[in-house]
Every structure is written in C-alpha cells, then in structure tokens.
Image (spheres, rainbow, N blue to C red):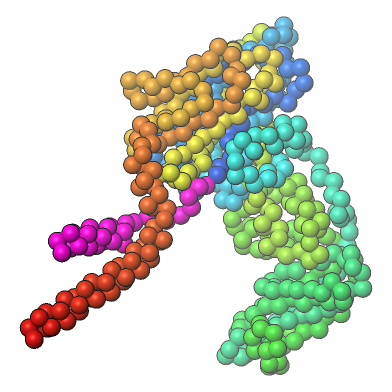
Amino acid sequence: MMKRKTLILVILVMLAYTVTVSANSGPVTWYHYPGISMITIDEDSPITVIKEDLHFDFSEEKENDFTRVGKVSARYTMQNTEEETTVSRMVFPFIRNLWNRDEDQVEVLFDGQPVNYEIYYGKEVEEVYSEDEFKEKVELADILESVTREKYVPENYDYEEVGHLYRIQLDSDREEDLHVDASFTLSDTNSRLFTRGNNSYGYDNDTNEFVIGTWLGDEHTSMDIFSLDEEIDIEVKGYESGVEDAPEVKDFTYEIVEEEMSLETYYREFLSADEYISGSVFIPEDHNIYYEVLDEALERERLVTVDHISSLLTTPRYVLIAYEVQFEALEEKVVEVRYDTMGSMDRRETVEPTYTYEYFLHPAKYWKDFHDLTIKITPSETYPYVIDSNLQMTKEEDGTYIGTFETLPEEDLRFTLFEKEEITSMDKVKGSIARNYYLLYFGGFALLGVMSLVLVGMVIRKLVKSSGTKK
C-alpha cells in the first residue's frame, strides 16, 4: 500500500508542474533579411578598399518586430588608384518593408561629415524563410537596375489612358445599418477596374457580372468604380445585411456621379485618399514604385482595390541608398554607413530565443581590390554571448568579439547571440516543455481527471472492504 501512495504522490506532483508551466507567446521563428555590403555602380572601378571596420553594436538593448536591434557601422577607408580625379557612384542596398519606414534612419558620412543621398525603391524580394535559400536569390545586377530616375514603363496600362469614374453617393436616415450593393456587367473579359470605398466585392467569370458592396449608416458614404475600358450601367440595391438572400430595403438614397478622368490622375487620388496607405507607408511622391505596383496589380487582378495596392506596397523590397564620392588623384577618403540591423529569431530549442544576424560581404568584391577587414561585435548585457559564428571571432576581456581578415573572406558573415555561453541539454528540455505548453496543459488536466477517478475508486473499494470486514 505504501508503494502505491508514493507512486500517486509522484504523479500528482508532475501534474501540478505540468499545468502551471508557462510559455512565451508569439512565433517560434521569425526571419529577417541580411545586411548587404556597399556596392559600386561603376564598371572597372578604380577605387580600392584599403580597410573596412564593420561594427555590430547591441548595447542599447533595443527590441522590435520579434528581434533584437543592433546598430551597424560599416566604415570603409578607400583610395583612388588613378592619377586623375574620379567620381565614384556608390550604393548601399538593404531590404525593408515599406510599412512605417520612419524607423529606417540611415546615415552616410564622408570623412566624418554627413552627406545627402538619394533613395531608390527596388524590386520586390521574395519571402524566403531560410538564409541559405535566400542567398542564392540575391542578384546584384537586378538590385542595381532600380538606381534610375527614368519613369517606369508599364506593360498593363498607359499613363495617358482615360477611364470612366462612377462615384456612388449614399445617404440614409435609418437607425440600423444596411448593406448596399452596386452590380454591373462588363462586355469585355479583359476590362480593367478599380474600386474604392467598398468592403466587399465579387464577380462571375462566366457571366462577367460584378458586384461591390459597403455598409451604410446614418453618415454619408461613397463608393468608386473606375472603369478603364468601357462604360457601364450600375444597379444599386440595399439589404438588411451583407449575407446572401438578405431582405431588400429601400429607405436610403443614392446618386451616381459620372466623370471622365485620366488613369494617372485617378490613381494619385486613389492612393492619397486612403489613410492606410497615405498615413502608414513611407514613399516619396512621384516615385516609380507607385507605378510598378499598379502594373503588378493589373497583371494579377481583374478588379483592383486599395487592399491590393497596399499589400504590394508593403511587401519587402530592396531599398537603395545612392550617393557619389569625388576622389582626387590617388586620394584616400573614409566612407561610413550607419543603420539598424535585425536578426532572425529562433526558439525551436530554447525558452529564450537565439538571434542570428547575417551580413553579405561578397558584394565588396566589385571594388578594384579589398584589404584588411575587421569585424567587431558588441553584445548587450542580457545577450552577452556569440555562441556561433561562421567566421573566426575572438572574445576580448571587455566582452566584445573581434575578427580580423587580411582580405575579403570567402564566406559571408553569420553569427548568433544568446543569453548563455552555450545551449545546454536542460535548455533544450525547457524549450520543449515551453513549445508543448498547451498539449501538456490540457493533457495534464485529462490525466489529472483519470487519476482522480482512480483515487475515488480506490477509496470506494477501501470503504466497501472495511464495511465487509466489520460485518
């Protein structure tokens, strides 16, 4: 009997631990794109990199977007190898989502003095959740194509095209909201459409019938239909709800205002009138990216909404910082770029995540020559260890890590930060428990219920046996 009690006690203790274990919320992994070295645009550049000091500083303990943010300084000492003045065109590329771009503060300095630069927004970057896979997709020629002020040449529209704008003005005095549908049929299966102000839409490819809808309360509302290829007849109806076969209602008013307008004029209005785009996405006016996104949307969609445009605007893409540096004959200059870097988060094995940072060094091979690279990593107090690095790094007495190389390494830099000096077996066990928290939680309750039934059964048997003994 004693052994049985001991076993039950052990199980109950395990259950108590199981149902109280906590787990971190959020994703298990989160991938961020690597940094990329400064590139020369000029073919047969006469500029040599005498040395580069590359510093990753995490001492500010800054966190954002499921990662720890570090400050990067890439400081190049460069020399013109020709005995005549030359102007070197340089580009510093990085990859960013254009959502809330105010956070991307990039500084460029020549001999310690800040200089102005131009920003170019390049091609969309494919979402890849593996650093090794992504590296194979980095084509420097594709990146540099975007460094141009020539106006984008579209494939699916012309800037001068004129379309028909139908603005449906809606009003109602009803106490309850109603749902308004605007339906129409196109004669051309290749007709191009824009809609704005609607929260639903649908179409039938067989009949070429379209419908857009919105909710109407006691405030004025409007929906736009902009047709590039043909005039349309619109039928407007109201319903008690947005579900299929909802009862029709007629106590609202509408007016359809028609106007001819150029595509370029309407597209600007289309973007600026939407708070989601104009208030959150940081893009200069008159930039090619607007028109590239429009071209892509028309390639993909029969009916283009604001959501289609905003989703394309906020996908990760190359952002190119471009500037020129004048070198006199045989002159040396120091060019420095400062920016924030974000690493890929991973807690598949641990409770507290690791953070891995990658920096593409190989673009530096496009300079005439490259010598003496020094890499310095300054960890934070809470994440003081570089537990893995593909390039040789030495830990200094002050806690920093230093790597020195006489020439450009064959591999790109990759290193991982962690709160401990190594990931132990116990860390992996705790990580497994944290990842399976919900399974353990509900499984623990189920097991606790079974054990409770077993205990109740044992007590009943004991009471029955005692009663029989007394008789």
Q: Residue furthest top?
A: 83
Between residues 148 and 369, which one lies in front from this camera angle? 369
In the picture shown, does residue 344 fall above or below 219? above
Q: Quadrant of residue 305?
A: bottom right
Spot occupied by residue 450 in the image (x, y as percentages of width and height): 32, 70
| Left or right of residue 5, residue 418 in this image | right
> Which residue lies at the image location 69% right of the left edge and 14% below the top edge?
368
Between residues 200 and 277, which one lies in front from this camera angle? 200
Residue 22 lies in the magenta stretch: yes
> Which residue lies at the image location 69% right of the left edge and 74% below the top edge?
200
Q: Which residues are magenta?
A: 1-30
Spot occupied by residue 28 in the image (x, y as percentages of width and height): 48, 50
Q: Quadrant of residue 254?
A: bottom right
Q: Quadrant of residue 136?
A: top right
> Which residue lies at the image location 81% right of the left edge and 84% below the top edge?
235
- Please name the predominant secondary structure of the magenta segment in the image: helix
Between residues 6 and 78, which one lies in front from this camera angle? 6
